[in-house]
Image (cartoon, helix red, strand yellow):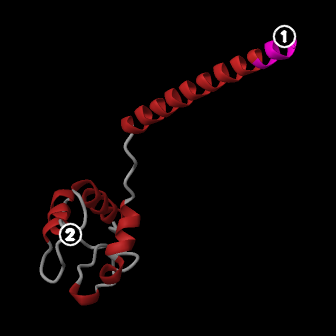
Amino acid sequence: MKKVLFFFLAAGLIIACGQTETTSNTGSTIAKAKKTASKTPPKIDGKKIYKQYCITCHGLYGDMGASGAANLTESKLSLDERIQVITNGRNTMAAFKSLLNEDKIKAVAKYTQELKKD
């Protein structure tokens, strides 16, 4: 009887210690993952945003010109000027400041520079 009682006591102790260790390891792993995630912000894909919002008027290659849209393959605007146009709109183009944050607008502006033909 004493052997059975000792066995259950030992088994319970091992299980209890094992669960505590697993929980604390999981907690520290999650904490490390959060620290790593906060150090490296996700990269913003300007091309993806362009395809979502701009392709309708400017086209896939920036030269469609629907609804009076500028031909981005011939645009001579600087990066800052492009950011201003995307942010505040111009002529028939709507402003995107209420839809996109500054980082996303900048990413789209950088992508539109890639459409320019030399």
Residue 47: where, in percent of width, then height? 39, 64
Q: Nearer the viewer, residue 39 or 110?
A: 39
Q: For numbered disc 1, what is the local secondary structure?
A: helix
Instruction: Check disc 1 and give the amino acid type.
Output: Lys
Give the labeled residue for mark 2.
96
Q: Quadrant of residue 77?
A: bottom left
Q: Which mark is residue 2?
A: 1
Which residue reaches farthest front? 1
Which residue shows up at 74% across the image and 16% down it? 9
Spot occupied by residue 7 in the image (x, y as percentages of width and height): 82, 16
The answer to whether residue 42 is left or right of residue 78 is right
Sequence-wise, the earlier of marks 1 and 2 is 1
As drawn, the residue found furthest toward the bottom would be: 67
- Residue type at numbered disc 2: Phe
Indicate which disc residue 10 carries: none
Where is residue 37? Give x, y as percent: 42, 39
Start-end of magenta stretch: 1-8
- Residue at 84 percent across and 10 percent down: it is 2
